[in-house]
Image: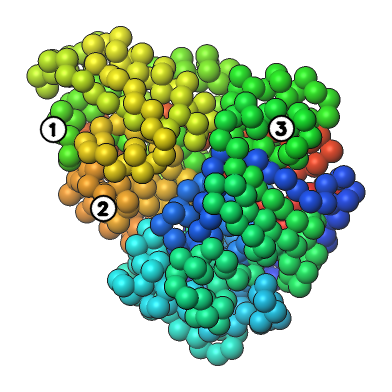
Amino acid sequence: MVVSSRRNVLKLIGAASLLPYAAPVLAQQNGVANLRVAMQDLRSELDPLHNRSTALVSFRVLESLYDKLFAIDYQNGGQLKPMLAEAIDTADSLVFKVRLRQGVKFHNGDELTAEDVAFTFGPERMLQKDAPGYWVGQITFPTLAEVKAVDRYAVEFKTKTPDPVFAKRLTSYGGGIVCKAAFLKAGNFDQWAKSPVAAGPYRFVESVENSHIKLEAHQNYWGGRPPLESIEFRMVREPAARVAGLRAGDFDLITTIAPDQFDAITADTRLDIVGGDTMSFRTVQYDSLTNPLLADPRMRRALNLGIDREGMVKSLWKGRISIPRSHQNTAYGALYNADRPIPAYDPSRARQLMKEAGYKGEKIIFKTVGDYYTAELAETQIMAAMWNAIGLNVEIQRKENWSQVQDDMPRWINNSSDGTYYPDPAASFVSRWGSASGFQKGGYWKNERFNELEKTLVGALDPAERRRAYQEMLDIFDEIDPPGTVLHSLAEFFGKRADFKWSPTATGLLDFRPGTIAS
């Protein structure tokens, strides 16, 4: 969507008829007032701009703590809908004027005003290079140049260059609004992140590293009374332990369920499974800069061609998930290329590329934590077996944590995912693989042409021009100089109590706002 005028924007996001949430539904009607959620990992830093919070497990918790200016309405074509703001207006895609909802209360009782919004995105927290949230903020808001309060309930954003998706960026991670006064009272950014004050439906109560995070209902929530009295997120690393806890009644909801666990859940009439494909991508990353063996793009192309994605999805996932046509999603609209093929499986061509690259059987390390992604260890073992079958000497090394995966040099190959939190390639393709991404900044890979095309993708106002740039970037990603590859959609399955009438969002997040839990 190109935000081009006040008329167009108001037409898209409407007025009272598009208020995002319906009347509250009490959790007691579902037998769940105090929700217990078991997850594979937790991060005790709860500011969306903290570098430890840029993970799906964090986003799932942060969704209950923070509200953003706008949200994406996936039930109505992926359009903007008002949240903490009522409207956004731009004439040139350079200056964006936002009108705020009045009477919104933070968790500490303070009223949310334009000063809080300007501070959230401003130099002290995000825009200056020495700001604590600068580097994470640059991933989602690379074009933002300035933000200021115009009056108590109006904010003006200015971008460095025209940004066709700026309004959508406000719906993504990093866009959660913080209380300025509470932030400034905190001793430092880390202390603030462990006890934040925001305006979401639930407020922070307690966090214990590697154990749990507790939230409770924000009684003055602008959208109505939250349907749950409290939420407790518990860290349970082993998938089997999460399933056992659900069956024993220790948990009401568990995340990241693998297909081989479905039967154990559905056999119990008190339980069921929700979820499936999301808009996000399950990927692997290659380190081509600190690793001479993978510096040759022919080796990385061979790795890509050596993966039988269809076989993996049919056997491991029982055909329940899809394989995208490269790093694309149909929700991207005019930018989507339905004629682009899914990634090929061609062992013969892979062997030829290995020969051309002069590969002599040297060891290639595949690092994994094993239990972060759904079926991660099984997929790692399947891919290693496929690669070994074509003559690549791939060895799996299981690590205790992500620091060991990412910090030990050389890094070789590791599992990853690319979260898509608004429907545009700028949301995940650019943020995960682009010039400002942790992948490139961390020294995994760099391609000058890719980065030049990125400027057009994120800055051009003409959809056709954006599409041409995006498709050429995909050519580089898939064939010319692959930094990694897409395996399949990032499937997310959740086990839950059958009387808890709830489903995850299209992005795989956990939304427990009013109207999300049926009676």
Mark 2–mark 1 distance (CA, rounded to whole Å): 18 Å
**Horizontal side of residue 83 vs 437, given as left or right:** right
In front: mark 3 or mark 2? Answer: 3
Q: Is residue 442 in view from this perspective?
A: yes
Label 2: state its secondary structure: helix
Pinpoint residue 101: horizontal percent, then vertical percent. Answer: 66, 77
Of callouts 2 and 1, which one flags the residue occurring earlier in the amino acid sequence? 1
Q: As drawn, which residue projects farthest toward the bottom?
A: 151
Q: Residues within 10 Å of mark 1 (few under 14, many from 20)?
A: few
**Horizontal side of residue 93 vs 193, given as left or right:** left
**Horizontal side of residue 236 vs 102, given as left or right:** left
Taking depth in this image into account, of 222 and 186 the one nearest to the observer is: 186
Label 3: state its secondary structure: helix
Residue at the disc numbered 3: 245
Give the residue type at disc 3: Gly
Of callouts 3 and 2, which one flags the residue occurring earlier in the amino acid sequence? 3
Q: Which mark is residue 98?
A: none
Tell me which residue sits at (65%, 48%) in the image.
Answer: 233
Tell me which residue sits at (32%, 51%) in the image.
Answer: 438
Give the residue type at disc 2: Lys
Tell me which residue sits at (24%, 16%) in the image.
Answer: 393
Residue at the disc numbered 1: 292
Label 1: state its secondary structure: helix
Residue at the disc numbered 2: 441
Mark 1–mark 3 distance (CA, rounded to whole Å): 46 Å
Pinpoint residue 67: horizontal percent, then vertical percent. Answer: 61, 65
Give the residue type at disc 1: Pro
Q: Residues within 10 Å of mark 3 (few under 14, many from 20)?
A: some
Pinpoint residue 269: horizontal percent, then vertical percent. Answer: 83, 25
Q: Residues within 10 Å of mark 2 (few under 14, many from 20)?
A: some
